Amino acid sequence: MRVFLIFIFLPFCFSSQILNVDREIKRDTSKNHAITFDLSFSGAKIKGDLITLKGKLEYDYFFRNNYFIMCLGTIKSLVNGKDIIQNKGYFQMRFRDDDTRKISPDAFSQYQWNGIQGMDYRVLFGGNLRFRWFDKEKNDLYSSIGLFYEKEKWNPLANAYAFDILDSSIVYRNLFRMNLSSKFAVKLNEFVDFAGLTYLQFPLNQNFLNPRWFFDLSLNISMNKYISFVISYNQNYDTYRALPIDKYFYSTSMGIRLRY
């Protein structure tokens, strides 16, 4: 299993709230598929029952020519009694190289939502050129450059919307973005991987100098071949928001990963 350590912005890179463009699982050489499932759950009693549930499922199917299709879905819900405080997630499909070529194509599509920010949906599709700078036994470095189209609906009247309603107008936004990313992975020892990913997404309009920046770190501690403990941190900075919400968001999480 490989995971990543993040750091620099290279002149070549990747995507749009495509939170994990690189797969996080590695198949057994005798199989043509791989599956991982992450699940974290917490509960507390405040005014009502406060329940947090986060899940992630990834399925990879590998072809004989060293390309594969990845299907990835993640959902996070936060419920207090009958009130939905947070509801977000995304489903993604991509077709790319299995880390064997120095330069390779990477095609993707994604559906995403985030109720707390007022995002009813974001649909996107596009492609990258992916560059392998090095891939050694204990570390690797990749980057990408590409283009994608995103179609969005923003709704400040959504039930989970967490900001002041300064304007109740629903916003539809469709645009192309240039996509730059960088990914690095370090295997500290047999049981511990430290990984990271960063990307910049530039709107191809008059707001080109207001890119979206995403940064993700992940620490994976393997208990055995099938079970791992995962600690993650990610942040999102965007000065070109469709609604008057904060420019900066971050989140941390801990959970269990099951692999097959």
Image: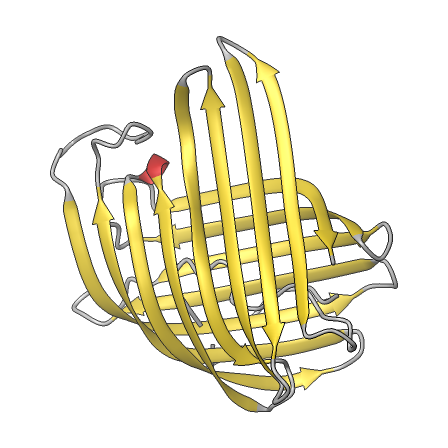
Residue 218 vertical placement versus 4 (above, below): above
Q: Is residue 53 visible?
A: yes
- Which x, y percent locates residue 170? 14, 41
Query: Looking at the rendering, which quadrant does residue 152 occupy?
Result: bottom left
Labels in figure, total: 0
Residue 84 in the image: x percent, y percent? 40, 25
Residue found at x 59% / y 62%: 59
Name the residue located 38 percent from the left edge and 73 percent from the top edge. 179
Relative to 206, 94 lies left or right: right
Please say if 44 is above or below 119: above
In the figure, residue 162 lies in which quadrant?
A: top left
Q: Position of residue 96 (x, y in %)?
A: 52, 79
Look at 18% across and 70% down and name the residue there: 205
Q: In what quadrant of the picture does the C terminus appear? A: bottom right
How far across and how far down the image is residue 165, in percent?
Answer: 19, 29
Horizontal placement of 39 versus 148: left or right? right
